[in-house]
Image (cartoon, grey):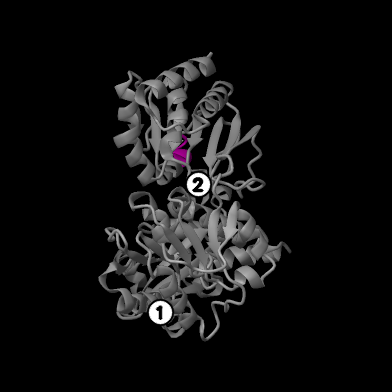
């Protein structure tokens, strides 16, 4: 039986290779083997920030399984698989041949698909009866949304005019009219402006009566139905803009992708939460790590101002000075507002000198990195473990982002609680992933966002950080 073989092989590999003893290697291996053998749908919850050695429990059953399987990976995970995990398997005599590209592999090979290739394979009908393994389940929806996105820039407008010379004047007039409207609107710190359906309508009417269109215009025309949203990314210095269009729910645009096939979905969802795309797995298991013996020290005093308060920037700089003072290890300050972040970086650099930097990938041992949440989540695995993480503002998505605003509007139309169903769960997941490093280094966490104590939903944030112990005063290390 596949489960027994995978258990035996993984146990021998762990003993021979001296791998870190993630406590659930064998459980994960048996569960994945069972799911592959039965071709059922399985959801596995991991602790946020779990050591990537857990991948061994996923790969060993795949190396022993002979039926067609496709693994959906991001670019970062693909690199780790090819450079780290597969050579580790080969060193102990386990072979897992991998095939890449949108065309299906020969029998006996694992099909490695990035998300755009998965979309191509599904649309071409070549995915057939392949089971799917998704080791980064939390990325499936946003990555598929990116894969389905349509992006139009100035070169595409020029190409369209060259392809349709008879309509060149009309296209130029429509482009100039749309440009004037977009560039006249306030675009906020994100430099993005939503494009309403009525702004798109004249161009759609014109293109619908013309002949064959060059790419990506046919895909843009095909996305005219509800469930999509458009926005422009503004370059104010050049008076140019780039058109973006994405689906709100990408799996609706790929009907049947996850239905009627074996599926193993792994991700760091908190207990009680899961994928937002309506999956009903046959088997669901939580393999989160046991509670830590040492609670996370948390500095989050009462009475802090809200992020939109006029004196918040001064409060932030003063508290960060106190937090950095005397620290001998790496400090990371997380803040998405770019203007506020750059001002904070300058203020801290005036106090602490060259040890302070903005989104540094090679910090000093006692350095201070001021960065956005997305930058930290991307670079965290390749940076030293911080001894202190400072959350200047909680990672709640701004409705100034047109995509977020469109997703919120869709939930509002259904009468649903868009904050607790969408923004808060996504923020909690990002927060748990961000603090994983400081937990491993036995460091401390500071939250300088006054909403933590002043809003009712702040209790959910504190629960997501469990176990923690309050720091009532700061002392240098």
In which image quadrant can residue 112 be found?
A: top left
Viewer-nearest residue: 84 or 237:
84
Task: Estimate the x, y position of residue 397 in percent, counting from the top left.
Answer: 54, 66
Q: Quadrant of the N terminus?
A: top right
Name the residue beneath numbered marker 2. Answer: 140
The answer to which image quadrant residue 308 occupies is: bottom right
Residue 218 seen in this snapshot: no
- Please provide percent x and percent y for residue 121: 43, 38
Residue 194: which numbered mark, if any? Answer: none
Label 2: element kind: helix
Q: Residue at x 37, y 67 (%)?
A: 326
Q: Which corner quadrant of the image does residue 396 belong to?
A: bottom right
Is 260 placed left or right of 10 in the picture?
Answer: right
Q: Residue at x 53, y 18 (%)?
A: 3
Looking at the rendered image, the quarter that the C terminus falls into is bottom left
Label 2: how many Cα within 10 Å (few below 14, some 14–19, many 20+):
many
* Residue placed most toward the observer, 227 or 459: 459
Residue 181 visible to the viewer: yes
Say whether residue 124 is magenta. yes
Query: What SS does tag 1 mark?
Result: helix
Which residue has dot 1 on it?
179
Estimate the x, y position of residue 304 in percent, counting from the top left.
Answer: 58, 76
Instruction: Say which of 459 and 61 sits in front.
Output: 459
Range shown magenta: 121-126
Residue 267, position as x, y percentages in the image: 53, 43
Q: Residue at x 48, y 51 (%)?
A: 439
Q: Is residue 175 magenta?
A: no
């Amino acid at each position: 039986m596949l489960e027994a073989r995978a258990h035996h092989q993984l146990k021998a590999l762990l003993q021979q290779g001296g791998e870190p003893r993630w406590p659930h290697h064998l459980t994960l291996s048996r569960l994945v083997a069972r799911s592959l053998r039965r071709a059922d749908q399985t959801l596995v919850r991991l602790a946020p920030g779990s050591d990537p050695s857990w991948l061994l429990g996923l790969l060993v059953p795949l190396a022993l399984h002979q039926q067609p399987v496709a693994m959906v990976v991001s670019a970062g995970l693909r690199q780790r698989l090819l450079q780290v995990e597969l050579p580790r398997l080969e060193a102990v005599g386990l072979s897992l041949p991998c095939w890449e590209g949108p065309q299906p592999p020969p029998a006996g090979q694992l099909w490695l698909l990035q998300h755009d290739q998965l979309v191509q394979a599904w649309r071409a009908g070549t995915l057939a009866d392949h089971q799917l393994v998704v080791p980064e389940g939390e990325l499936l929806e946003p990555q598929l949304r990116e894969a389905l996105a349509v992006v139009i820039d100035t070169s595409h407008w020029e190409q369209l005019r060259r392809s349709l010379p008879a309509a060149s004047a009309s296209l130029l007039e429509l482009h100039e009219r749309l440009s004037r409207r977009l560039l006249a609107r306030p675009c906020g710190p994100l430099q993005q402006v939503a494009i309403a359906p009525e702004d798109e309508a004249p161009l759609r009417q014109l293109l619908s009566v013309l002949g064959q269109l060059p790419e990506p215009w046919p895909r843009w025309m095909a996305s005219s139905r509800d469930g999509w949203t458009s926005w422009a990314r503004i370059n104010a210095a050049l008076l140019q803009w780039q058109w973006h269009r994405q689906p709100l729910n990408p799996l609706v645009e790929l009907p049947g992708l996850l239905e009627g096939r074996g599926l193993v979905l792994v991700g760091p969802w908190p207990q009680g939460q899961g994928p937002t795309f309506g999956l009903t797995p046959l088997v669901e298991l939580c393999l989160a790590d046991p509670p830590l013996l040492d609670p996370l020290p948390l500095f989050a005093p009462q009475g802090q101002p809200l992020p939109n308060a006029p004196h918040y920037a001064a409060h932030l700089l003063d508290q960060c000075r106190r937090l950095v003072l005397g620290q001998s290890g790496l400090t990371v300050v997380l803040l998405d507002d770019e203007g506020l972040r750059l001002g904070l970086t300058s203020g801290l650099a005036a106090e602490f000198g060259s040890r302070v930097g903005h989104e540094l990938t090679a910090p000093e041992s006692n350095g201070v990195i001021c960065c956005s949440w997305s930058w930290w989540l991307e670079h965290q695995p390749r940076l030293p473990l911080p001894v202190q993480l400072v959350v200047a503002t909680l990672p709640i998505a701004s409705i100034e982002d047109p995509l977020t605003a469109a997703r919120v509007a869709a939930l509002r139309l259904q009468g649903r609680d868009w904050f607790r169903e969408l923004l808060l769960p996504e923020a909690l997941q990002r927060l748990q992933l961000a603090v994983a490093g400081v937990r491993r280094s036995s460091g401390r966490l500071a939250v300088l966002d006054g909403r933590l104590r002043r809003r009712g939903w702040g209790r959910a944030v504190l629960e997501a950080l469990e176990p923690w112990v309050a720091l009532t005063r700061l002392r240098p290390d």
